[in-house]
Each structure stands twice: as structure tokens, then as C-alpha cells.
Amino acid sequence: MEKEMKSIVEEIIGKIERMSLLQDQGCTSEVHQVVTEEGSYVLKNSYERKYREWLRNEAGVLEKLNTNTEIPTPNYNGYFEGKNSSHLLMSFEKGVTLTTLLREAKKQELLSLIKSFGQFLQHLHETTATGFHNNQWLVEQLKKAEGYVKSGDADGRCELLQKLILNQPSDVQQTMIHGDCTTDNVMVINGKVRLFIDVAGMTMGDPRYDESLAIRKWLHHEEYIEAFYEGYRRYKVTKQEFEYFNEGLYEFF
Ligand SMILES: Nc1ncnc2c1ncn2[C@@H]1O[C@H](COP(=O)(O)OP(=O)(O)OP(=O)(O)O)[C@@H](O)[C@H]1O
Ligand SMILES: [Mg+2]
């Protein structure tokens, strides 16, 4: 680590004893475990403009949630920016992502984990009084998508975006959402899904987006979908809604 960066990190979490790159890396950042006398932390670094913006949002969300006991996330420790990089410090959590566990799990365990994911997401969608407000979530997402298309920062095509703008699904009650609710971004601790990570998109928004991303890998596994809905009982997305969010909006993020 650069000297200057090291000293900022140490100012926040104390003298570094050791540091290592985490085995599981995401696509948008570089994540390290940093151990000090005080505890164990994650240092998440981003370098590209779009991802630096996401990291700044994630820092804001984590900081806001530090005093919230309803929504389990890592604890926020600090955030700082360099000239070409952004850095977030949070608590290191002893868990494994749901994606990793599903790879190894036997059938019964797998179904139980998926049900637990459904329950965990339902709890988030039922959480009120979070201090987050946003009445125009979808409009804002579409605007962001347009910006990404213009700057060449999105995979999605312009025609697809036009289609999404013209064919917005009917309104539903907005709830607290994760905003990138794939199995990569929840962690399992002691056999249950208990923690959200990668929370840059967490805000008040359309719960059908979370639901669609949550089940996206199980389209051809009816049993898995059933297990999810044993845990998530508040609503089932229609095929059209699923396609709008998973094959539509998500293409731009
Ligand atoms: N607080 C934490 N404690 C322990 N491990 C963590 C923590 N945060 C992240 N990780 C690990 O680092 C990996 C990458 O983290 P994260 O999903 O936040 O990165 P990302 O680059 O934003 O991913 P994405 O490509 O989904 O945007 C996770 O899969 C997880 O294994
Ligand atoms: Mg992630």
C-alpha cells in the first residue's frame, strides 16, 4: 500500500498488523482484509469513475445505517478519496456469500438457504422508518441509465432504454430495497442469510427489482423458486415484471 494511503487508513483504524487480498473479489472494486490490534476490517478500493461514485454511495449508506438495528450491514469506519481512487473502510464480517455456499451445498441445505434469503429480503422490504426517502426511484434509475448510455458506461442499448421508459410497470408501494440484490451481495452466517453487503443502491425503491435479481439464477429451477417464495411471502413478480427489471433495467447497472 502507498505510504500516504497507509497513514490515512491507520488514522482511522489503528496500526496495521497485516493485510491480504480477499479470495472473493467483485467486478467493480478490489477488496482487502486489514487486521489491526483493534479488529478486522475490509478496505474496498475503486478506480473507475462510475464505480467510485457507487463506492461513495455505499459509504453514505453504511454510515447512515451505523445506528440502524433493523438492517444488517457491515459497520462503517471511514471513507476517503485519492486523486484517481476511492476507499471505503468497514468491518470484516465472518460470513460467506450465498453464491459461494450454493455452489457447495447439498439439496436440502440449498433449499433452506434459499428460503432464508427470501425471509431476509422480506424483512428488508417490511422495514419502515429508515430515514431514506425517494418517491421517484424508477424515474431516477432510468435517468442514471441514460447517463451511462451517453457516457458509454453501460452494456444496455439505447433502444432497450427507450422501451423501458415507454413501458414502465404499474406503480407499487415503494419499500426499502437493496438495489443489487443478487446472491453475491448477501452473506450467510451460521446457516442463515444474515447480512447485506455491496449496499451502494440501498434506498427506498421498487421491491420488484430486488425480487427479480434475487431469483434471476433460478428461472429453470422451479424447486428453488418455490423455496424462495416460502420465505418471501409478500408478493410474486409476474413474468413481465421480472423481464422488465432483470433483462431490462439491470442491463444498465
Ligand atoms: N464487510 C465484509 N466482510 C467480509 N467480506 C466482505 C465484506 N465486504 C465484501 N466482502 C467480500 O468481498 C467480495 C466483494 O465485495 P463487494 O460485493 O462489496 O464488491 P464489488 O466489487 O462491489 O462487487 P460487485 O461486482 O458485485 O459490484 C464479496 O463477495 C465478499 O466475499
Ligand atoms: Mg458485490
Image (cartoon, grey):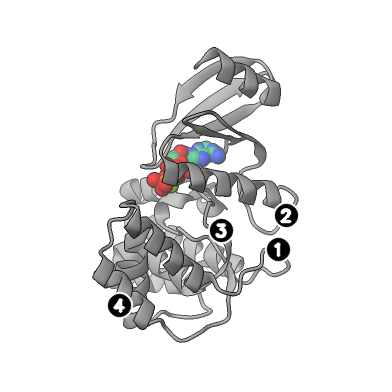
> Mark 3 sits on what residue?
202
Q: Which one is nearer the viewer's eye here, 11 or 103? A: 11
- How far apart are the two marked residues, 2 and 4, measured between alpha carbons? 38 Å
* Amino acid type at mark 4: Lys
Task: Classify residue 80 by image quadrant.
Answer: top right
Mark before the other along the chain sequence, 2 or 3: 2
* Amino acid type at mark 1: Thr
> Mark 1 sits on what residue?
130
Q: Which residue is drawn at 51% across and 73% down?
A: 206
- How far apart are the two marked residues, 2 and 3, measured between alpha carbons? 13 Å
| Cβ–Cβ under 8 Å for marks 2 and 4 | no
Q: Residue at x 58, y 81 (%)?
A: 173
> Mark 2 sits on what residue?
68
- How far apart are the two marked residues, 4 and 1, measured between alpha carbons? 33 Å
> Mark 4 sits on what residue?
163
| Cβ–Cβ under 8 Å for marks 4 and 3 | no
Give SS at disc 3. loop
Can residue 213 be seen in the rendering of this structure? yes
Q: Residue furthest front?
A: 150
- How far apart are the two marked residues, 4 and 3, measured between alpha carbons? 25 Å
